[in-house]
Amino acid sequence: MTGISRRRFLGYGLGAAVAVSAAGRVGAAAASTGLALAKFIQPVPLPGHGIVVATPSGANTYSFTQVPLARQLHPNLPPTPFWAYDDGSGLAGQAGSFGMAVVAETGTPLQVSFRNGLPATYPSWIPVDTRLTPLENQVRVMTHLHGGFVAADSDGSPAVTPDGFGFGQTQSVFYTNQSPQMPAELLWFHDHGLGATRLNVFAGLAAAYIIRDQYDTGDEPNPIGIPGGAHEIPLVIQDRQFNADGTFLYPTSDIAGVTWIGEYFGDVMLVNGKVWPFLNVEPRLYRFRILNGCNARILSLDLGGARFVQIGAEGGMWDRPVPVNKLVLAPAERADVLVDFSGLAGQALLLRNSKPAPPVSTPAPALTSVMQIRVGTTVTTPGPATIPATLLGGRAAVLPAPAKTRYITLNEVAPETAGWYLNLNGVHFDAAATETPKVGTVEDWVYVNLTEDTHPMHTHLVTFEVVGRTPFNADAYQDAYGGPNGVPGGIDPTSFATGPMQPADPSERGYKDTVKANPGQFTTIRAKFSLPAHVRTPQSYVHHCHIVEHEDNDMMRPFIVTR
Ligand SMILES: [Cu+2]
């Protein structure tokens, strides 16, 4: 057997201390000040109040510059330096480390540019691993619209532009916002620099991209009958560590010759870029647009006394609402939820995070508190009295049977050594593309997880239907087919199944762009590989694990849409 998994290497049941060491957080606990920060003493930034709603630079045109910025993220911390997308406003209206939102309309394309106005080389608080980057410690950025249906040269794809964009250079992109692939939904754009995505996102390069349509107008009232205006609230959740001087802390490895760590886990939670904030609500119905913006942490969220009713996920709104007790969101997953506070006047609720239940598996140390929600006693505008039984303009994910099925293995090689890396199909990112779907065809992709952890797999270009997850004997499959870099791609694991396929979770009702591939299972997704209007084959994209540490080293592969 090859590709000994991290947990097998370390032994089972050794608890949180091992998990921390596995993530390479050496010395981090001693250096971090986060645990001493008082909770719930500052308000969460909201659009127009600490989150900048981007101003266009022309008709359907936005011109951003990536810039260094600093803000106080907690009253007891000095200002924290970070990186941000400046829409030309100078970002005076940005309160925290997450502070930008673009509002787009489905059917109306946008021309967007990103000029690199960052330092030429990485500052000391961002520990680059020059084994993984194309140009050593040069800052190379590239913006990816996560969930965008765009041409390859507008995708921010390391398969197209592996060197990214250096100081003074501009990335120009065309975001189609084409229907039905880009309906009303919450996307986000974030950095995708090759070998440095984890660092550039950690440094702050992430922003919201909200698409509206004739039904999901964002106003109240709206044709769907859901909350809008000030009662629709984006919540971007990110964990971080801090140094006493206010800088973000990103630990380095204790392995000789290695800087990269297996996962970054914070001990402080930021919501919309502020440490452990609070939110005042009225005792009525609200809509929350939640994004897990963490590097590696899988969230399992609950609200104590209040229940979530989920109405959508990554690929837009569903045809009907689904009650959900816990929102289990891996990095890059989104949830569109309604919460009724009408029976909770005067109460203070805790948005709480807990360890995700099996089969989801993660080495993350506990981080329980997310934010406080304070329910007032008066309602100024009542809003919708009930949650609609059907959601106008929404859809469930339904695709015809696939023309082809591909098997993609997830491997972890030589953990806790200088040669530690992760891969797909037993090969590095720069090997020739093996996934080459024909344009316009439907394919099933089966992610065969041979590691001990959950990996959130993200496909560029397409959103997909989660078909189901099948339990299987990973050890036997690995014993039969494993090589020095894990099991190669393309090998059907069906004969190693130990039970029937389990259907997608009710919270996976609609189209998604990120799916939890759990250990002990193979996960089947189904997508139609269309291209935007007037875009010709071939077009190169990537698919990868959205634990950004894994993506950087080297759990990412190109795919090519062919004719
Ligand atoms: Cu991963």
Image (cartoon, grey):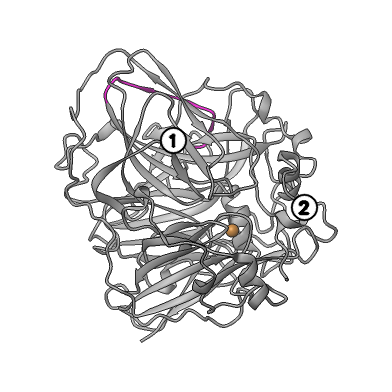
Residue 280: in magenta span? yes
Look at mark 1 in the image and give the residue it sits on. 93
Measure the alpha-carbon separation of dots 1 and 2. 47 Å
Q: Quadrant of ligand 1?
A: bottom right
Determine which quarter of the picture holds residue 36. Answer: top right
Residue 546: in magenta span? no
- Inspect this view and state whether residue 153 appears: yes
Amino acid on which disc 2 is placed: Leu
Q: Nearer the viewer, residue 317 or 470?
A: 470
Residue at 71% in and 30% down: 33
Image quarter in which the N terminus is found? bottom right
Image location (x, y in percent) of residue 341:
31, 23
Question: Circle 2 — which element?
Answer: helix
315 to 441, vertically: above or below: above
- In the image, is 216 to the left or to the right of 28? left
Image quarter in which the C terminus is found? bottom left
Query: What is the span of residues highlighted in magenta in the rendered image?
Result: 272-284
**Tag 2: Cα neighbours inside 10 Å, few (<14), some, or many (≥20)?**
some
**Which labelled disc corresponds to residue 10?**
2
- In the image, is 285 to the left or to the right of 326? left
